[in-house]
Amino acid sequence: MKALVIGATGAVGSTTVSILRGWGHQVTPAGRQSTHNGVVLDVGAPDLQQLELLAEHHDVIINASGVENESLGRSVGQAVLIDISATGAYLAALAENAPTAAMVLGVGLVPGLSTVLASELRTSAGDALDVAVMLGSGEKHGSAAKAWTIGLVGSEITDTADAGTVYNFRERRWFASSSGKRHLYLRAGFPDHDLLGAERGVKIRSWLALSDQTSTRALWLISRFPRLRGLIDKVPEFGSQDWAVTVVNRRTGETRRATGTGQSRATGHITALAAVAALKNRPGRPVTLDAILSSSELAMLLDIAIETA
């Protein structure tokens, strides 16, 4: 397999490059700045002719750059596009603009791993599911990830399972970890409801916590005063790098949970595995991760442990 990895020097992209090469695949790193044995490519530019030319020589295009260009799906030719974005409106636009393109959308911990876990819960029409995501407060994230989080603070959740107006990080809920300890989570605008819930007739609400609960409470406070969102970029990373994704059916209590250490590394592993799986089982349209991978397949990755309750 020949893969073009856009954003190859970022936290997720560099892991994806390393994993794919370790599995024996050919990888071309790409980004806005020159890299060793790579190409300079700006996918935020209005003219994507260079991407179109590169796509002719690659089987898979992986967008790990954080750049959200709704025209990407029309510019990858016969290659499969893997996009790690967690922005629901962008992913919907990608699918709408290229409805017959081979694409896997929302590849990562949430959406992505969370989508797979939610898809495997036993549900009935009208059920309410919660996706509770805890990220390690001690992990250093790239500029794109920080900018994405800052943009969420106090903003309206447009991709929501609720009829009324909901704002990021303002609504609170408690969830228990595998040890039974309860943690505070904040409502967050991850797009699993639109990627999966609406299609299956269930309501999916997403929640976010940091492993350091003081940081979670600070995030809630900043959400009440959005003008303070710039403080997030100045907060030092401290605490663990452990993460957890928990999916619960409120009606039945059925729970699936995935845990690991190092969000960026786990996302890179998932992205690499998605690229290989999508090439073996090429989608005929834009799909989500659950269409090509199961939780048992994801559990084979060294960085991920999955349990069911």
Image (cartoon, grey):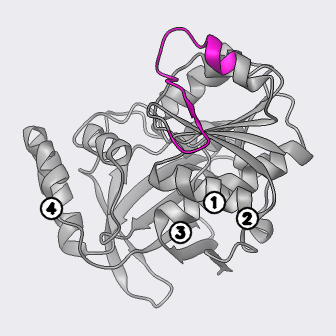
Q: Are marks 1 and 4 in contact (CB under 8 Å)?
A: no
Q: Residue at x 40, y 66 (%)?
A: 135
* Mark 2 Cα-neighbour bin, 10 Å: few <14, some 14–19, many ≥20: few
Q: Say which label, 3 or 2, has the lower sequence index.
A: 2
When asked about the image quadrant of residue 286, the answer is top right
> Circle 4 is placed at which residue position?
218
Furthest residue in direction bottom, as rendered: 179
What residue span does the magenta drawing correspond to? 35-52
C-alpha span from label 2 to label 4 = 40 Å
> Can residue 277 be seen?
yes
Overall secondary structure of the magenta stretch? loop
* Mark 4 Cα-neighbour bin, 10 Å: few <14, some 14–19, many ≥20: few
> Circle 1 is placed at which residue position?
18
- The circle on residue 246 is 3
In magenta stretch: residue 197: no
- The circle on residue 92 is none
Q: Amino acid at mark 2?
A: Gly
Q: Say which label, 2 or 4, has the lower sequence index.
A: 2
Q: Amino acid at mark 3?
A: Thr
Question: Is 176 placed above or below 33 here?
Answer: below
Q: Are marks 3 and 1 in contact (CB under 8 Å)?
A: no
Q: Say which label, 3 or 4, has the lower sequence index.
A: 4
Q: Is label 2 in a helix, a strand or a loop? A: helix
- The circle on residue 22 is 2
> In which quadrant is the C terminus drawn?
bottom right
Q: Amino acid at mark 1?
A: Ser
Q: Residue at x 74, y 25 (%)?
A: 55
List x then y, in percent, for residue 13: 54, 49
List x then y, in percent, for residue 141: 35, 57
When asked about the image quadrant of residue 109, the answer is bottom right
